[in-house]
Amino acid sequence: MSKGSLWRSTPFRLAVTFGLVFFLTFVAAGFVTYQVLRQELKRSLDGSVKELHAVIASSDDLEDLISMVDAYSRVNPAREWVFCVIGADGRQIAGDVSTPPLPDGFSSARADALGLRAGPDYRVFSGMVASKRLIVGRSRAATDRLERIAFTSLLWANLVALAGAIIGGALLARKAQRRLDGIAGAMTAVSHGTFDARVPLSGSGDDIDTVSRQINEALDRLSALMETMRQVSSDIAHELKTPLNRLKMQIDTAIRGDERGEAVSEALYDARAEAGQINATFEALLRISQIEAGARKTRFQTLDLTGIVASVAEIYADVAEDSGHGLTTSIDAADPLKMRGDRELLTQMLANLVENAIRHCPPGAAISISLGRQGGNAVVAVNDDGPGIPAGEREKVFRRLYRLDKSRTTAGSGLGLSLVRAIADLHAGDVAIGDNGPGVCAEVILPLEERHPS
């Protein structure tokens, strides 16, 4: 990924945005901390000044007051503290500094205003002791130094936080962008016909992995659909080539017979029958496509699967007998199996399974229909003891137009079981072909409605 595209990428912009929010929050928190520290230093300084003022003001008379002020002044050569006593006439009586007129209480004074050389400001407290004014002050040098240290520390912390936000945001954005590039690369490959391309997963299980997994599942379905379409196109080309050639030959035969003055009715009837079979094949393909698209879900309703199976078994009992087969039914009528579905499609699905067994089993074969409950599902099975289907062919028979070699001489289009699977999928079910030893066991599993206790 180029540097320019990184700067324009959404992950980087989001990272910068959140980094900026974090930085501004950090600055705001630092400012609040700095102000709290300043106020606390000021309170501490004011407390010490007021406390010493109270100690000196507790002197009993003027001499004690003056001697105490002089004593404090002598032990304070560094001028960390300043003291001054002013008489009622405004003249300085004691102390080491001269002060301008100061109001009662706390105030700030510059060093030169106190008659000192340039230096830090002082925090002073002025109060009356009898008729005299006592002024006590303390240098702000220590508190100013602590404030500078705190400000410098917060400034460096802010700079480090800003650098961390930018660098961390760039790294996180680059990592996220690489994963998004993986998604884009897979989609680009698929759009260019590489249908086996998939989005790489990081294994972290985060939201990007979840989206990537969902994209891969969609690509799997797309790949399967494209393979099905390719297979269907190939099957249509192969399977319909023969009937179309037959139709052409029948029409040519009718034309030549007509030119010779012969009767062509039989050839035309055969051509019409062949065209009808081709048309039925396309109608079945269209019906399967409509079912797979879910168009019939709007007709779903709550129905009793037991009644549908019983009805189909009753209809095909005579058909099986006429063809020399025996048809038996095993249904528990006392256990109604309720489900949401399309009655017509479910009837056709079961009819296709029974017709498939009758068509491909020799006379004398036994066919059975059973219906039962398995947990929250209904299991419909159509079994026979006919020639069966080889294990390697059992999944292929669900493909459109696929027919076993031994079945190509019988009537049919190879779409019956494809329609069965499409109907089962529409109802969120599953269908499988197994070995009945001998014969075929065709089993359909359909989800039932949840039973609520009365």
Image: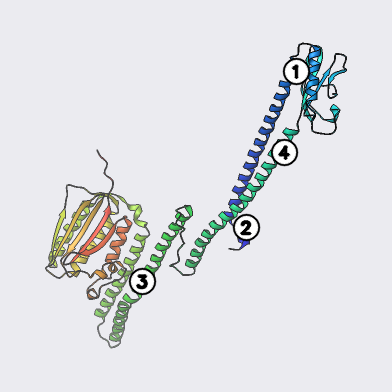
Q: Disc 4 or disc 3, which is closer to the eye?
A: 4
Report the residue at 30% width, 65% height from top: 418
- At label 1, the amino acid type is Ile
Q: Nearer the N terminus, badge 1 or badge 4?
A: 1
Near-viewer residue (244 or 237): 237
Return the disc, 3 or 2, that comes first in the chain's sequence. Answer: 2
Tell me the SS state at disc 1. helix
Q: Earlier in the sequence, mark 4 or mark 3?
A: 4
Mark 2 sits on what residue? Answer: 7
Q: In this rendered view, identify the residue nearer to me: 27 or 271.
A: 27
* Residue plotted at (22% across, 66% down): 356
Residue at (74%, 14%) from the top-left corner? 58
Q: CA distance from mark 1 to mark 4?
A: 32 Å
Q: Earlier in the sequence, mark 2 or mark 1?
A: 2
Instruction: State yes or no: discs 3 and 1 in contact (Cβ < 8 Å).
Output: no
Using the rendered view, name the quadrant where residue 142 is placed. top right
Q: Earlier in the sequence, mark 4 or mark 2?
A: 2
Find disc 4 in the rendering and name its residue: 148
Please give the residue where the numbered disc 1 appears in the rendered image: 56
Q: Is residue 237 above or below residue 189?
A: below
The span from disc 3 to disc 1 (Cα, nearest Å) is 107 Å
Is label 4 or label 2 in front? Answer: 4
Percent from the top left, x then y, of residue 162?
A: 64, 48
Label 3 Cα crowd, 10 Å radius (few <14 / some 14-19 / many 20+): some
Residue 231's mark?
A: 3
Q: Position of residue 204 (x, y in %)?
A: 46, 54
